Every structure is written in C-alpha cells, then in structure tokens.
Amino acid sequence: MRILYIVRPFGPLGGMERYVFATAREMVKRGHHVSALCRSVDEASVPGSGVEVIKLNPKPAKRGWHDRYVFRDAVTEFFRDPANRRCFDIVHSHENTIEQDVTTEHGPCTAYGLRLKPWKRLDFSARKNLAIEKQKFHGPNLKALVSCAQRVQDIALREYPHLAQKITRVITPAYTYLQPVAKDPARKPRVLGFMGRDWKRKGLPKALEVFRSLRRADPSWTMLVAGCPPESLPGNLVSQALALGMDERPARPSSEPAVQFLGRTDPQEFFGRIDVLVHPATDEPFGMVMSEALTCGVPVVFSDQCGAADHLRSDGLRVLRVDAPVSDWVHACVALAGHNFAPLASRTWSDVAAEHEELYTNIATRC
C-alpha cells in the first residue's frame, strides 16, 4: 500500500512523534511505500528509515491553537491538487487535519476537557481548539478512529457518538527497547523515581509529597527526577524539593541532596538507579514510561487516570486513585521497593505496525 502519515514534527522527538515515526519505519519494513507529510524533520533519525519526507513550509505560530490551524490549512492546500490525493491509498493523520482516512487520538479530546471545566468555554483558545477538533472528527473522508488507549477511545466515543459508525481500534504503543536492569543485592532499595517532561500533568507535586512522607519515616530514601530540568520548573517547587532532608541527619554521609533533578536522561540508565517509579498523573493518555519501567523489572505505582491501567498486567504495579491520600501512595511504594517480579512481556513496534496494516486492509476491503 501507499501510505501517508501526517504529523507536524517527524522523528522520535516525543511520545506521539515516536509512535508515528516507529510505526512508519516498521511499515516500510513490511513492504509498503510510506511517506510523511510534516513541517519539520529530526535529521538525525530519518536517514535510513526508508520513509519519504514531504515538508510543508507554514511558519510556526506562537499560540497553540493558531499553530494547529496554520498546519491544518497547509495540509488542506497540499490536497487541493487531486494528484496528491491519488498518490496514496491511505492517509493517516495524527494532527487536527480534515482530509485523512484514519485519525489517531493520543489523548482525551478537547470536548471532554471542556465538559469537565465548562467555564473554559469562555476562553477564546479553548473554543478554537474545540472547533478544529470537530472539523477533524467530521472530515468527509474519515473512515477509522484509532486511539492509543481504551480510556482515550471511550472518551472520544462518548463525546462524538457518530464515530461509533466508523472503524474503531485501540492500538497501544510499543515498550520493548529497554532491558531488565541488574540491582546490587546488598543495597537497601530506597530510591524513588519520577520521569516526565510535562511535570504538572504527570503529578510531580504529589510525587514530592509522597517522597517527603517516605523520608520522614526513613531518612535513607532519596529521589531522582528525570525529564524536567530545574529551569523548567517553578522556583519555589525546586527550592522546596532541594530543601528536603537538609534539616535531617542523613542515613549516610553524602554531599548530594535528597532530591536530584537529572533533566533529560537515558531511560535505561535512569531505571537502573531507582527502586520504584511513582506516577500520580492527573491526565495521562497512556504512559509509556510505566510500561518501559516494568520491562526493566522496576515496579511502578501509578494513578487510575493513566490509559495504561487498562492494558498492563504485572505483579510489579499498583494502580491507585489519583485523589487517594498520600499515605496510600507511601504504603504502595514501600511495599514494592525491592520487589522482584517477572519483567513485563515486550510489545514491539512490529506488533504495532501489524495492527495498523490489518486496519488499512480492512479499510481497503470496505472501499
């Protein structure tokens, strides 16, 4: 098949972008002709992928909603030439565009957020985001809806019931490139980990509360925060975190603070340094960091607002209500620290591509 993927940046630059890039690369390996319609390219990753890149040239806009409209209009202009549409059997968009056959949702839709917080309808940006979302879901060529997690799919179908008449699939991301980490059996397991760039949505403030309670009970606990460098965080949050343990006598002499901010780091190395990962996210479409930790043999405590809760099964995880008291989170972390369990079975990007291939074949058969 001739397949076109639509995404603003093409390359493994973030969770959604990695999903698109890895799937496109695997589809090439399966013998398909794959192109990417994008605005920017990760030049370090794309060479050798086998994916043909088609770059559009809209200038990025400062406001998020405006940037989505600018890119959407550039894609529409591209398809004004009928020859461009005829070049592809399947057009699959991961953005708020109109012309696609397949659209993928990587997070709860805007309509859901506005239903939970109706006062935001007074915000101009929110109204524009809702409008472009509605146009996407009512696109004239739309044949299928794909979601990265069952929770995301359920929300989309509840907010847009007409989508139930389309082909609907949940295709979760892969979690395979990490290997089980070796722990020193003589070391007392007392390192709490948090990883995530979008720190507020992923629950860093509550994670720090959990750590504060852990350290009150046992001063040997330390914490590593990855993915969000200190300069990206509010100053008071960083100062409070760095002050943890300063007025206590540490379990062993050390010049390092109780909480260390690592910024962007290699996940394999990070998981090798922690004993339990905490992820009290308030809104997490899937949560690849959790599945990756479990493939490494690192236990995870995460909230019921993570899409992965519907898909991951392991003795090394605990799912808690996002509003559960800190004491519940502390208890779960203590219970899991040092817990040995079978690493989560891998799911490969080849598996993900095979499910996309089946979907595209189904669409072609119906047409």
Image (cartoon, rainbow, N blue to C red):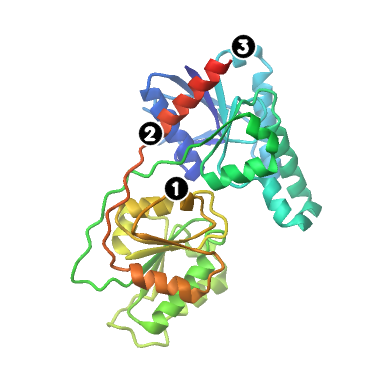
Distance from disc 1 to disc 2, alpha carbons, whole Å, reads 15 Å
**Disc 2 residue type?**
Asp
Q: Which residue is denoted by mark 3 in the rendering?
A: 83
Q: Earlier in the sequence, mark 1 or mark 3?
A: 3
Left or right: residue 199 versus residue 96 is: left
Q: Which residue is denoted by mark 2 in the rendering?
A: 351
Residue situated in front as seen by the camera: 234 or 267: 267
Residue situated in front as seen by the camera: 138 or 205: 138
Tell me where residue 27 sits by quadrant: top left
Q: Which mark is residue 108?
A: none
Number of numbered discs: 3
Crowd class of label 2 (few under 14; some 14 to 19; many from 20; radius 10 Å): some
Q: Is residue 43 visible?
A: no
Residue situated in front as seen by the camera: 37 or 130: 130
Q: Which residue is denoted by mark 1 in the rendering?
A: 311
Left or right: residue 114 versus residue 343 is: right
Q: Earlier in the sequence, mark 1 or mark 2?
A: 1
Q: Estimate the x, y position of residue 345 in percent, counting from the top left.
A: 31, 46
Q: Nearer the viewer, mark 3 or mark 2?
A: 2
**Disc 3 residue type?**
Ala
Q: Estimate the x, y position of residue 219 in percent, counting from the top left.
A: 35, 82
